[in-house]
Image (cartoon, rainbow, N blue to C red):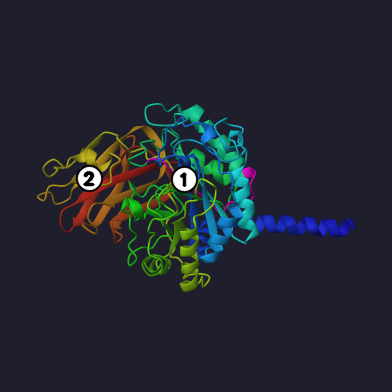
Amino acid sequence: MKKVLFVMALLFASNTMQAAEKTLHQLQQEFVDLRFGMFIHFNIPTFSPEDWPDPDQPVSTFNPTRLNCHQWALAAKGANMSYGCLTTKHHSGFCIWDTKTTDYNSMNSPVHKDVVREYVDAFRSEGLKVMLYYSILDTHHRIRPGLIDTKKQTALIKAQLTELLSNYGEITALIIDGWDAPWSRISYEDIPFAEIYQHIKSLQPNCLVMDLNAAKYPREGLFYTDIKSYEQGAGQKINTTENQLPALACLSIQRTWFWKESMPTDKLKDVNWLVKENIVPYNNAYCNFILNVAPNRDGLMDDNAVEALKQIGSIWKNEGPTQPIPNSESPIIQTNIAKHRPTEYSWSYDYGIGDFANNDNFSDAWTSHPLIREPWWEVSLDRKRAFDRITILEQQADAIQEYRLEYLNGKTWTTLFEGQAAPGRLKQHTFPAVKAEKVRITVLRHQGTVKIAEFGVYAVL
């Protein structure tokens, strides 16, 4: 018996080790291979006429008296979905799990239920993967612009994520929202991205971290996310002919993310359009498609939504793994120490002066004057800093054809890179860490006007 137990222990340890040894590329491939899943916006906004309710809406209003997460899981299976993702906490800060961090939670509501527990158990019982959604922006707990207490609020967020990633088994991915987006205005310095990212990975190394930040960051790179995301309802569309990154596209089958009173009789999005114009082309472009279906105030999905999912399942089948995703640069998770720092540069054209290249706005650019044969731009860091990554994003692809990167340490400029530019808008360089007070780019050859939208220098973690 002791030998049997010993062997079982070894097998368990081996399986655990194998799970921990998955590379990010493997996890990204597995995510894309899931193809199609269910987004479930269900939270206190369900009981409000607005998706952004009063941040102090009473806990007593959350009362899904017929809550049945198993019905959700069966509806997902009816559409041949492979996973679900539930809004554990949306922007108004209400937690639908048994949290010890705040009284503003579903355990204190009339139904007194841990909805996250019921959801994960129901979906796993049907063989579906489990993902969770979590908002950094939290208007109830005053995690919003102008009221950020970095140390205190980061500690609260980490405590909540610890509960979600410790008490509910394996979480395939955590979708994060309300962070460093133009509308949320909570920066990756206000709530430090690298600290939260590493905290998540320390709890569940195989949990993908997805920040819904495509409203700000360009599609060419994985800026602060393991998976590139596209919120179609906000006008974000993946380019199915050019995309080379593991991606997620999300859309709601209903007119809003959370349930509203007209939805049982509303016209839903056409199922043939969802399949032919979304699931199929996106899957062929390294993109997983997640369709939101909002449960009603009883805690059930409306009949018209369930029927639409059945129709999807009748015309679309999950054929298993997709094509291999291309190799890509690792996600950027470090602080950009060039952001908002003083700049010097060669003659600019019109108003496109140098600070446009590091103002944390990807839509404008430092624009070199056409008469300058070898334009240059440099940034002064706040002190001698260690960094191991640089990104250069052009506003227009391929104007820069050859360039040199240098850094200043003391009185000596040292070359980091000199050569031909990689094709496309984004150029990325990773290298053994160096220390410097300044970084400079000199464009040695170009075609057309040089326009640098953002220049990033990333601190060593």
Quarter of the image that includes the N terminus: bottom right
Is the stretch drawn in magenta largely helix, strand or loop? loop
The range drawn in magenta is: 166-180
Say whether residue 461 is visible: no
Question: Which residue is identified by label 1?
Answer: 176
Please tell me how many numbered marks the rendered image carries: 2
Q: Nearer the viewer, residue 217 or 383?
A: 217
Q: Residues within 10 Å of mark 1 (few under 14, many from 20)?
A: many
Q: Nearer the viewer, residue 242 or 102?
A: 102
Q: Residue at x 54, y 59 (%)?
A: 83
State left or right for residue 60 relative to residue 272.
right
- x, y (%) of residue 231? 37, 53
* Distance between mark 1 and mark 2 Cα atoms: 26 Å
Question: Which residue is identified by label 2?
Answer: 364
Q: Are marks 1 and 2 in contact (CB under 8 Å)?
A: no
Q: Which mark is residue 401?
A: none
State left or right for residue 387 relative to residue 380.
right
- x, y (%) of residue 304? 46, 60
Residue 420 highlighted magenta (yes or no): no
Q: Nearer the viewer, mark 1 or mark 2?
A: 1
Instruction: Tell me the amino acid under the disc marked 2.
Output: Asp
Quick check: 263 above or below 195? Answer: below
- Tell me the quarter of the picture where residue 333 sits: top left
Quick check: 92 above or below 224? Answer: above
Which is more N-terminal, label 2 or label 1? 1
- Tell me the quarter of the picture where residue 446 sits: bottom left
Quick check: 451 above or below 103? Answer: below
Q: Secondary structure at mark 1?
A: strand
Q: Nearer the viewer, residue 145 or 68?
A: 68
Instruction: Tell me the amino acid under the disc marked 1.
Output: Ile
State left or right for residue 55 relative to residue 182.
right
